[in-house]
Amino acid sequence: MTTPLRDTQTHPPGAFAIVVLFLVIITVPGFGLALGISRATISESEMRELAAWPKWSWAPQDMAAWPDTFQKYFEDHFALRNRLIDWRSSLLWNGLRTTSSDTVIAGEDNWLFYGDDGGINDWTQAEPFTHEELEVWREALVRRRAFLANRGIPFLFVIAPDKQMIYPEYMPDSLRRMRDDFRADQLIAHMQQTTPDFTILDLRPAVVAAKPGELLYHRYDTHWNDRGGLVGYQAIVRALRQWFPTLQPLQRNDFDTSPSVPSGDKTTLLGLTDAGKVAMPGLVLRRGDGYRVVEPDRPDPYGEVGLLVTEHRDRSLPKAVVFRDSFAGRLIPFLSEHFSRAAYLWQNEFDFDEIEREKPDIVIQEFVARHFFTYLPYPGIIPN
């Protein structure tokens, strides 16, 4: 008689733990999303806004599109997503000196540069301005000035320099340039040739001249820090003196330093921690701020809002409307010391209704150089 064989198979050590770990891995992202563990609206590593929660609608086409929209939201917001991306970015950069994003350029000596938003294109200059594009820009600038001149308002157009314009020595040799100039240079030259009475304020000479003094852009930021912003602001105020002779720009020795205020961007490239940036205290006006933010109610310390309005206790100062991009975030604390009221609008086109409401004494437009690759104005919308 044959005795049945006993089942001697046993589970390998740790099998139960592996099963539990697997279940945790596949359930934590969903549970974390449901519990609202991460409420981030941007991804610093990817330098982009994350998908918003899809609004429900009973319209048939909206209901049909809702699953795909929710899928995009889930992929952007599941628990630990940003943390995992940051860990990956840190590992690749600190271990292999390579970036985890096509939008970030690995430079020399541990410097990073933003390649998206026209950054790489403006550096390589494989596609300079066409004559037609230059003419569109000329018409837009001249018509904006004419619109304001009819209301007795002067216009100052300001070009803010990209990081690679000021620190080209840290750009990688593998990223070759096709021309020595930038689109900003091409527009300035075209305006000088065709409309010599229109002056564009290029902040590069002032910022380059201040470069030996102290660091003006952090290694892992794309914008200038408060030191670079201060230099750019000083050049702007000097230009404004042709209309407001009593304006005097603040000097470096008017400021103390404090670790409680920012010295650079809210975000950093790849979400990496820059020890030099963390250690650099921000600039604080020694006499105290003369202005206050009246809109929005809870101002962002970096000025990252679509509309920001400041008012100064000295009501005799002129009023300003400033159309700007992200580079003006570090300019706002300085410029606001010279205007009884200043409205900062984050947009490239003029808001003519806002100008009529504010009735400013000056309109300033700050425009970062790389955006000459991503934006072309629309002269036709400017009222005659």
Image: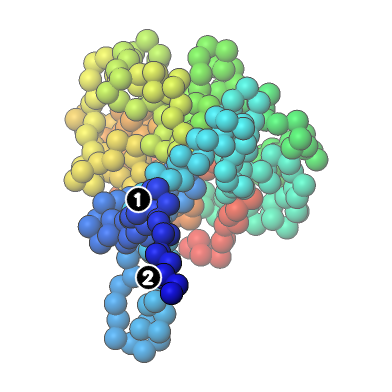
Label 2 sits on a secondary structure element that is: helix
* Near-viewer residue (83 or 198): 83
Q: Amino acid at mark 2?
A: Phe
162, above or below 253, in the image? below
- Residue at the extreme right of the image, as rendered: 178
Q: Is residue 245 visible?
A: no
- Residue at the extreme bottom of the image, as rendered: 60
> Disc number at residue 70?
2
Residue at the spot of label 1 = 17
Q: Looking at the image, which residue is at 35% across and 54% down?
A: 16
Q: Position of residue 182 (x, y in %)?
A: 70, 39
Q: Looking at the image, which residue is at 42% across and 34% down?
A: 265
Crowding near the residue tagged with mark 1, few <14, some 14–19, many ≥20 C-alpha atoms within 10 Å:
few
Q: Position of residue 202 (x, y in %)?
A: 59, 33
Crowding near the residue tagged with mark 2, few <14, some 14–19, many ≥20 C-alpha atoms within 10 Å:
some
Q: Position of residue 210 (x, y in %)?
A: 55, 17
Q: Quadrant of the N terminus?
A: bottom left
Q: Position of residue 153 (x, y in %)?
A: 42, 45
Q: Looking at the image, which residue is at 39% across and 18% down?
A: 279
Figure disc tally: 2
Q: Amino acid at mark 1?
A: Ala
